Image (cartoon, rainbow, N blue to C red):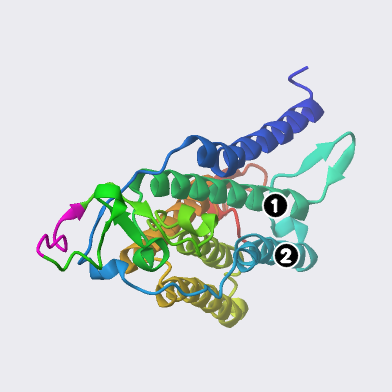
């Protein structure tokens, strides 16, 4: 039964779906409920925590469009155009047949690329969630949102620390938040500054598209279009990072760490998992000059993404 091509293909689809489902369930459901955020203290004179809270102008809806809708649409359009304009004899693609029906090559390519992309995005979310909970770094607007109190009957505050006791240089480990105007959701994420989730996911998505465009749109007459698309992707990643800094949602080091993490994951998924730049050995028959009947076979390297 395992030798049946239909069974193998169906098993692969089921395994891929379960793997993606498991990664996203762990990252978005299990870890937020099971992991406790590290209770990190502060210094009253820490200037990096005294920034005012500003409403971010990039929402989760914008993030969803940037990291899911945009990459999926980009990959679908490119693969459909390649299927329409590139001759089938020029393509080195794996073709699938299911229940006697041949699956178009662009569908299998879209499935492979989008599947690898979504798996890498799930790994990025998993890394973000683990790091945020285990570091517990306070956001720049911590004092504005939390208004912490501590000490006897919670009477001590940073505003009263200028007196004789002078707590300004003392590390405060145990405290309570007293700002009742802040929502519970805002108080819950005030310890989740490192790394920047927006920067990580946006950098991952945009770097993945940059590598993908380099692999798929490599023809000389597409060089200007490819460079423009890659520049636009890089600009979107920088815009998301700038927004997190300008609205005081994350520290500069949080944004840099998130961007580096997203870049590493994107490079790993495109090069070592999707194999966008892998070359294969293609058999080529050559005829000797003096021999008209007997020939010999030679090999040459050809990129899997080539025309």
Q: CA distance from mark 1 to mark 2?
A: 11 Å
Q: Which residues are magenta?
A: 164-171
Residues 253 and 261: in front is 253
Q: Nearer the viewer, residue 63 or 183?
A: 183
**Membership of 168 in magenta stretch:** yes
Compared across the picture, whether 263 is left or right of 76 comes to left
Give the position of the N terminus as an image quadrant.
top right
The percent position of residue 164, horizontal first and vertical second, equals 9, 64
Write the residue at 90% across / 36% down.
100
Please say if 90 is above or below 93: below
Q: Residue furthest top?
A: 1
Observer able to see residue 88: yes
Disc 1 crowd, CA 10 A, few/some/many (<14, 14-19, 20+): some
Nearer mark to the viewer, of 1 and 2: 1
Quadrant position of residue 78: bottom right
Residue 241's place in the image compared with 189, above or below, is below
| Quarter location, residue 43 | bottom left
Q: Which mark is residue 109?
A: 1
Asked whether residue 292 is drawn in magenta, I would say no
User: Do tag 1 and tag 2 residues touch (Cβ < 8 Å)?
Assistant: yes
Q: Residue at x 43, y 68 (%)?
A: 249
Read off the residue under disc 2.
82
Residue 236 placement (x, y as % from top left): 53, 74
Q: Is 282 displayed left or right of 13 in the figure?
A: left
Q: State the predominant SS element of the stretch in magenta.
A: loop
Position of the C terminus, as image quadrant, is: bottom right
- Label annotation for residue 175: none
- Name the N-terminal-most of marks 1 and 2: 2
Quarter location, residue 8: top right
SS at mark 2?
A: helix
Asked which secondary structure carries label 1, the reply is helix
Q: Residues within 10 Å of mark 2 (few under 14, many from 20)?
A: some
């Amino acid at each position: 039964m395992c030798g049946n091509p239909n069974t193998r293909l169906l098993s692969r689809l089921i395994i891929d779906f379960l793997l993606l489902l498991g990664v996203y369930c762990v990252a978005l459901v299990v870890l937020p409920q099971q992991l406790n955020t590290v209770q990190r203290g502060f210094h009253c004179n820490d200037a990096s925590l005294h920034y005012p809270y500003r409403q971010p102008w990039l929402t989760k809806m914008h993030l969803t469009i940037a990291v899911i809708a945009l990459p999926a649409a980009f990959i679908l359009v490119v693969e459909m155009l390649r299927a329409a304009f590139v001759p089938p004899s020029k393509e080195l693609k794996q073709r699938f047949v299911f229940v006697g029906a041949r699956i178009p090559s662009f569908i299998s390519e879209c499935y492979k690329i989008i599947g690898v992309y979504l798996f890498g995005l799930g790994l990025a979310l998993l890394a973000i969630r683990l790091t945020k909970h285990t570091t517990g770094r306070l956001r720049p607007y911590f004092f504005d949102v939390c208004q912490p109190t501590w000490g006897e009957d919670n009477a001590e505050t940073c505003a009263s620390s200028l007196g004789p006791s002078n707590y300004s240089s003392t590390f405060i480990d145990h405290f309570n938040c007293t700002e009742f105007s802040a929502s519970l959701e805002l108080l819950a994420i005030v310890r989740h500054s490192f790394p920047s989730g927006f920067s990580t996911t946006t950098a991952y998505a945009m770097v993945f598209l940059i590598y993908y465009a380099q692999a798929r749109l490599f023809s000389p007459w597409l060089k200007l279009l490819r460079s423009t698309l890659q520049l636009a992707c890089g600009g979107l990643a920088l815009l998301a990072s700038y927004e997190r800094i300008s609205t005081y949602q994350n520290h500069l080091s949080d944004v840099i760490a998130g961007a580096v993490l997203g870049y590493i994951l994107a490079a790993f998924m495109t090069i070592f998992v999707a194999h966008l730049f892998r070359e294969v050995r293609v058999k080529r028959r050559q005829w000797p000059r003096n021999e008209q009947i007997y020939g010999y076979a030679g090999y040459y390297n050809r990129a899997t993404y080539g025309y």
